[in-house]
Amino acid sequence: MAEKVQQKKKFFNYIFKLWFLFFAGLIVAVLFFYGVANEYFGKMPTFEELENPETNLASQIYSADGQLLGSYYIENRSNIHFRDLSPDLVNALLAIEDIRFTEHSGIDEKALMRVAYGVATGNSKGGGSTLTQQLAKNLFPRGENLSTLQLIIRKFQEWVTATKLEHNYSKEEIMAMYLNTVPFGSSAFGIKSAAQTFFNKAPDSLNLEEAALMAGVVNAPTRYSPVRNPERALQRRNLVLSKMAEYGFITQHVCDSVSRIPIDMSNFGVLDHTSGQATYFREFLRSEMHDWAAKHFKADGTPYNIYKDGLRIYTTINSRMQQYAEDAVKEHLGNDLQPAFYKHWKGYHYAPFVFPESEIEAEVDKIIERAIRRSDRYRLLKNAGVSADSIRRSFRTPTRMRVFSWKGVIDTVMTPVDSIRYYKYFLMGSLMSVDSRTGFVRAYVGGNDYRFFKYDHVTQARRQVGSTFKPFLYTLAMQSGEYTPCYKVPNIKYSVQLPDGTFWEPRNSSNDRVGEEVTLKWALANSNNWISAYLIKRFSPQSVIQMARKMGVTSPIDPVPAIALGTPDLKLYEMVGAMNTFANRGVYVKPIFVTRIEDKNGNVIERFVPEKTEALDEVTAYKMIELMKGVVESGTGIRLRYKYQLNNPIAGKTGTTQNQSDGWFMGITPDLTTGVWVGAEDRSVHFRTITLGQGANMALPIWAMYMQQVYADPTLGISQGDFQKPLGNVDIEFDCDKYERKQAQSRRNQQKQFEDEF
């Protein structure tokens, strides 16, 4: 009996110890998790921090027609909602990462037991982290160099964070948050950036094989990169597909069929600032947005940061018109003008530089030396303390490099000095196109290729404008009331006395109609310099400058008579804005690039409206339109008619500068004002003949090719109609043949009246 009592006592003691250990363990676990939650073992993220994680959100630049042009970022990351996800992507992620996602509350006990069993038996079958735990880790990064104890504590902290997330967010929100935070490689953070980078698609447009690939990549972006490791990526994608079939998301037949489809990376493109559409525009806008951000503040009092705050910048650029503009520059320069330039200079030792024979060697050496000192290579070597002799040698050492060509990037070996000479040969093209009424900039091409030519010829460069400046002078004449487009002036030499007592007397490039009386319309159409001298003598350089200022020109201009021929150095941006004043019935509209800016939540921070100033009356503006129509109808721009078959009403002006260094064309239609400049980086590089170097040959074709594509796209709604006449009766004859007949008839009538009276 005593023995039985003793056995019972031992049994109850054993049971008591088990329960004691159980409850003690439970209490310790509760206290431990309480300590974790209350930050006894280290800082925990607050609910506010979880709701607003400090991730670097890229600011996105959108075109007026809703296309993503590019981003400003430290991490190329943008957020989306669950509704923006492809169902195939959601199913693929569940199949490969967390099939019980909809069942657990942040911690998957079954998965943990599987992990524990694998550790105990040495037969591991995967991890135990749920999507929610992975999200917690992404929102609350572990840091580096953690000890084993710290790593264990951090794991429990992630469990607590995951529980908080499950308590405060729906499963759909957690799924979207997870996909917003994970890296996909190739500088893409979050599914929105990844879908754009890998497939040039939105996340809701991913098909089954693309969704499976994206779901597979998140586990190890580098190992399963479809760019770096395509074979591993294919295996991983097919594993995801097999898991989807195993869990019933797709049939086995679909799995087998899709698994045979190769990975298509034809639309892959890293979204950096040197690639994609409107690269020059985006770089110009970066500076503008920097200035804007420094003056605008968030709710916490800190200024906005375009690299971190996920702003949405809605621009005036039309993506299709931008593409047409880029295509036109490439087609004309790459297929026509640059080959003609090479042919023109073939066989010349110092090509393509133009200097007097006695000076050319020294001048070319100076140009190359300046280019060396301005190069990134020189600056980096000099800052690193490399000696001048070593720098010189490095510039004459053959180096493997990638260089620009119109046929595509070339991998080659050449010395840096030779690469400088190679690039000096290239003619550059730029274009800006604005909506005539609103001033919205619809297309902006700053150069040939931003990867190789960083200088922006729209808003940075000032180049001599040539005869495109003459409309400012003629505007004064039209505004005075004394002159009309059909007013006649003797086509003879005119002299203007200078302050030092000498005389300025320009030459003409043509001997047409010398000594005859010519109309102002004919003179402008044919860029006659003698008539420009007549007008500058009549109105003074200061008056012309004042008119240019009213029309938006801000660059310095010397008040000398030679401005009548276009000696000022101005920006293409200024010229397009000024010429648009004629199309906009005398009202100058400052070209505008952005319509609104939103924060990361879609709240509008600021809207932008065009700045407008009445520069001249609408009758004067209409006179100028009729004058400039003559350039296209019978003057230097006539090839728009016979070569490019653009027969709609167009007002225009060509411009050719000294030695053919710059070629310009300004084209105005009722809906669009577009300017084009073409020239080399150095003004000493140019065609040797005016036939090839004039604006009508260098710049006008780009305008024509651009407008042909614009008119061929009916969705743009660009009219081919005529300009609107001013309200009321404009008692002016713009057809100079009719005007001359009327004048002749008037003279006959006066003569007859005189004879009748006497």
Image (cartoon, rainbow, N blue to C red):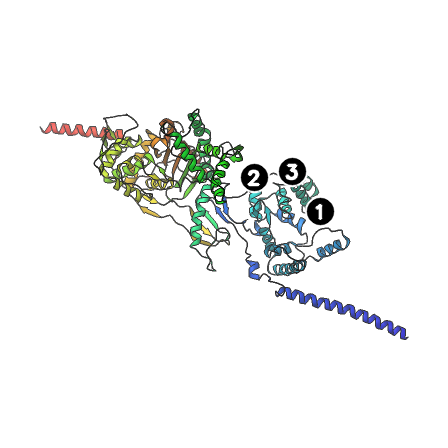
Ranked by sequence position, the earlier of labels 2 and 1 is 1
The amino acid type, in three-letter code, at marker 3 is Ile
Q: Which residue is mark 3?
A: 261
Q: Residues within 10 Å of mark 2 (few under 14, many from 20)?
A: few
Q: Residue furthest top?
A: 347
Q: Residues within 10 Å of mark 3 (few under 14, many from 20)?
A: few
Q: Helix, strand, or loop for circle 1?
A: helix
Q: Quadrant of residue 724?
A: top left
Q: Where is 10 relative to 55, above or below?
A: below
The amino acid type, in three-letter code, at marker 2 is Asn
Q: Residues within 10 Å of mark 1 (few under 14, many from 20)?
A: some
| Mark toward the viewer: 3 or 2 | 2
Q: Which residue is mark 2?
A: 267
Q: Helix, strand, or loop for circle 3?
A: loop
Q: Where is 235 relative to 136, above or below?
A: above
Measured from the top left, where is residue 52 in percent x and y? 54, 57
Measured from the top left, where is residue 317 in percent x and y? 44, 43
Q: Helix, strand, or loop for circle 2?
A: loop
Q: Where is 42 relative to 355, above or below?
A: below
Residue 700 seen: no
| The C terminus, quarter of image | top left
Alpha carbon distance from label 3 to label 2: 16 Å
| The N terminus, quarter of image | bottom right
| Mark toward the viewer: 1 or 3 | 3
Residue 71 seen: yes
Ranked by sequence position, the earlier of labels 1 and 3 is 1
Q: Residue furthest left?
A: 758
Q: Is residue 186 left or right of residue 8?
A: left
Q: Which residue is mark 1?
A: 246
Alpha carbon distance from label 1 to label 3: 19 Å
Q: Given contact means CB atoms under 8 Å apart, are the residues at marks 1 and 3 in contact? A: no
